[in-house]
Amino acid sequence: MKILGIESSCDETACSVVEDGKTVLSNIVASQIDEHRLYGGVVPEIASRRHAENITWVTKAALEEAGCTMDDIDAVAVTYAPGLIGALLVGVSFAKGLAMSAGKPLVPVHHIAGHIAANYISHPELKPPYLCLVVSGGHSHIVEVLDYSRYHVIGRTRDDAAGECFDKVARTLGFEYPGGKFIDNAAKSGDPNAYKLPHPKVQGSEYDFSFSGLKTAVINLVHNAAQKGETVNVNDMAASFQNTISDILVDKAMLAAKDLGYITIGLAGGVSANSGVREKLQKACDKRGYKLYMPEFKYCGDNGAMIACQGYFDYLAGRRADESLNGIATLSL
Ligand code: KG4
Ligand code: ZN
């Protein structure tokens, strides 16, 4: 079964054809990041306009690379939530038109479910139930993946998402947007114990995250140094920050796994590309005898393949949308 997946929830216009939820026949991603970088973040209005310009050629290219026409496609899957509303609406409207004109079923996919599904592409042997740590630019969740299309979110961030925290700390250290990968690079030549940073406690739920205190601590150290006419060592600060946020993420995920009895763990979302998070989570899982699944680097960030993959499982679960499908900016998993 071939599913065409469309993703346009933020600043990547992406389309992919995936067979049986695991074999990627094509994966085209048009990134707008060079333009948004000029403004230090994603500008929603620009994102919508670029999606409208790119979505047709990106879809044509995905079909061509897969050696398919719409006749070969069994269903059209599209990200309908959550994300920037104007950006989502471009993908949703396009997918509705495409599905309707080709007479194919339309499958609405939740963006976070798509990130989780990236693991099925890289590891088709992975089967629910398992516990997944989802860390992206907009979300930080600990999720019980009960089945391919059924989830129970047990922890979430109370303020910034992990990726947002990486990006804000990166900006403070002078890196361009989005700075997560620059922190990752700088951390490789820094001392992770050079700066002592807080591990914020969250009242109420032991699986919830809070990253704003950590971000503020870095900003204060940088500003205090500047007031004294000094500078922080950027590599050391990047390494210390990455070490701390990785510890926070891994500690909570391991606590949840222990409490709920999971021995299979997944990692997903843009921040799953981070070498510090990957290494620490791998070590923690090895120590406990847990099996860890992480997406290949090309499927960590936003892409159409993860949407097509999740679309396949949602299709099998009977999920369908009709012409009334709308984008939803905020929607829990
Ligand atoms: O999942 P994603 O592509 O978009 C959302 O759904 O939000 O995640 C983007 C986030 C950005 O904050 C970016 O800085 C972060 O993922 N990111 C990284 C790395 N690569 C991307 N953060 C830390 N280390 C990386 N290597
Ligand atoms: Zn994403």
Image (spheres, rainbow, N blue to C red):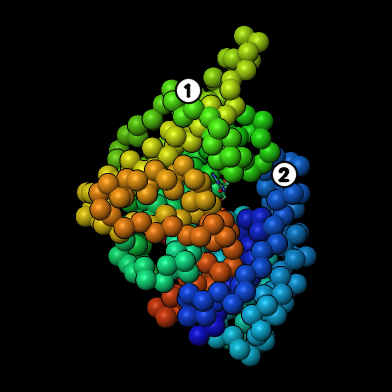
Residue type highlighted by circle 1: Ala
* Residue 249 found in image quarter: top left
Instruction: Give percent across and percent down for residue 4.
Output: 59, 77
Secondary structure under badge 2?
A: helix
Q: Residue at x 48, y 74 (%)?
A: 22
Left or right of 42 in this view: 113: left
Disc with the residue nearer the chain's start (1 vs 2): 2
Instruction: Give percent across and percent down for residue 34.
Output: 74, 49
**Quadrant, the C terminus:** bottom left
Q: Which residue is mark 1?
A: 194
Work out whether residue 267 can be spotted.
Answer: yes
Work out whether residue 158 can be spotted.
Answer: no
- Cβ of mark 1 under 8 Å from ligand 1: the answer is no
Residue 79 is marked as none
Q: Which residue is mark 2?
A: 37
Instruction: Give percent across and percent down for residue 189.
Output: 55, 32
- For this orientation, the residue located farthest to the front is 189
Above or below, 172 relative to 154: above
Secondary structure under badge 1?
A: loop
Give neighbour class at mark 1: few <14, some 14-19, many 20+ (Cα, 10 Å): some
